[in-house]
């Protein structure tokens, strides 16, 4: 996407009313919700590898309702980001070279990986775990809703972390969008019950499907998300 296209894109969204923004946010996050589910089911049906665990976590009505609440709260987080952008708290800079955009995407991913490790590790403190994170860990195995089965405070906390990081630097909207898609796809793949990544990718310190599945089996290990770097550094890694 070239600079002129992005600027026209931003100009279009600057002119939206708040009602139009609300509709757009709900529509965009609904699309991403079903995209994740569709991607999960597609990989699950076409991946030739055996399941990591014998059975998937059963589908429960309570999980469906909670996943829809997550969808709604993700829409709220987007609207908070829009408000901060319109108020000048978030600045977007589209005068970036291709190399600068690549660096931004990598930087966003690595910074968020560290913050998510810390956030996730703290969520496993006994008191916080009982209130916030226990519901997600009822999925010792996983299914296509597992990614979205989160306590509302977890959803808001993760969203506000992204907003905080974006406020620190004048990122391109392209970099932010690519990062958010990486996050969605990685989260979907991480909650498969089939190993998606080749075994050699573990040597690249990637947070593979098996890596995150081990966390669902042993909640004191593998707190990372995109990579296993922080777990290896802080001694919480399990292969």
Image: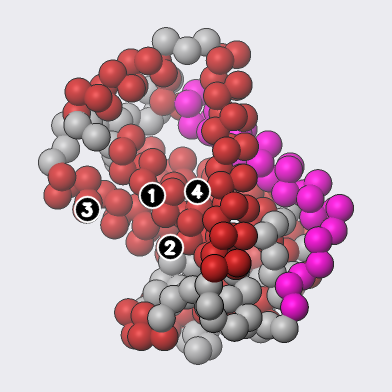
Query: Cβ–Cβ below 8 Å for labels 4 and 3?
Result: no
Between 18 and 130, the residue placed more toward the observer is 18
Q: Where is residue 84 in the image (x, y as percent from the top left)?
A: 46, 27
Provide the residue designation for mark 4. Answer: 161
Q: Nearer the viewer, mark 4 or mark 1?
A: 1
Indicate which disc, 4 or 3, sits on the residue closer to the N terminus: 3
Magenta residues, start to end: 55-83
Mark 4 closeness class: few <14, some 14–19, many ≥20 residues within 10 Å:
some
| Magenta-drawn stretch, dominant element (helix, strand or loop) | helix
Kind of element beneath mark 3: helix
Residue 61 is inside the magenta segment:
yes
Residue 207, image x, y percentages: 45, 73
Residue position marked by numbered label 3 in the rendering = 103
Residue pictured at 54% horizontal, 68% vertical: 46
| Label 2 to label 4: alpha-carbon separation | 11 Å
Residue position marked by numbered label 1 in the rendering = 179
Tally the marks: 4
Tell me which numbered mark, 2 or 1, is placed earlier along the sequence.
2
Would you name the residue on which mark 2 appears? 113
């Amino acid at each position: 996407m070239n600079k002129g296209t992005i600027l026209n894109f931003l100009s279009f969204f600057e002119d939206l009313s708040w009602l139009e923004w609300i509709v757009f946010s709900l529509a965009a996050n609904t699309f991403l919700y079903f995209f994740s589910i569709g991607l999960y089911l597609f990989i699950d049906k076409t991946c030739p590898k055996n399941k990591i665990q014998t059975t998937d976590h059963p589908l429960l009505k309570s999980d469906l309702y909670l996943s829809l609440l997550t969808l709604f709260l993700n829409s709220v987080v987007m609207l908070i980001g829009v408000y901060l952008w319109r108020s000048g708290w978030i600045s977007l800079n589209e005068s970036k070279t291709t190399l600068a955009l690549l660096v931004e995407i990598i930087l966003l991913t690595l910074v968020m990986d560290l913050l998510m490790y810390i956030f996730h590790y703290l969520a496993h403190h006994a008191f916080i775990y009982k209130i916030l994170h226990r519901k997600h860990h009822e999925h010792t195995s996983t299914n296509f809703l597992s990614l979205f089965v989160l306590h509302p405070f977890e959803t808001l906390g993760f969203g506000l972390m992204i907003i905080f990081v974006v406020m620190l630097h004048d990122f391109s909207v392209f970099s932010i969008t690519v990062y958010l898609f990486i996050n969605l796809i990685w989260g979907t793949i991480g909650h498969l019950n089939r190993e998606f990544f080749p075994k050699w990718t573990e040597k690249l310190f990637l947070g593979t499907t098996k890596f995150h599945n081990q966390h669902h089996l042993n909640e004191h290990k593998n707190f990372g998300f995109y990579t296993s770097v922080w777990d290896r550094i802080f001694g919480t890694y399990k292969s």
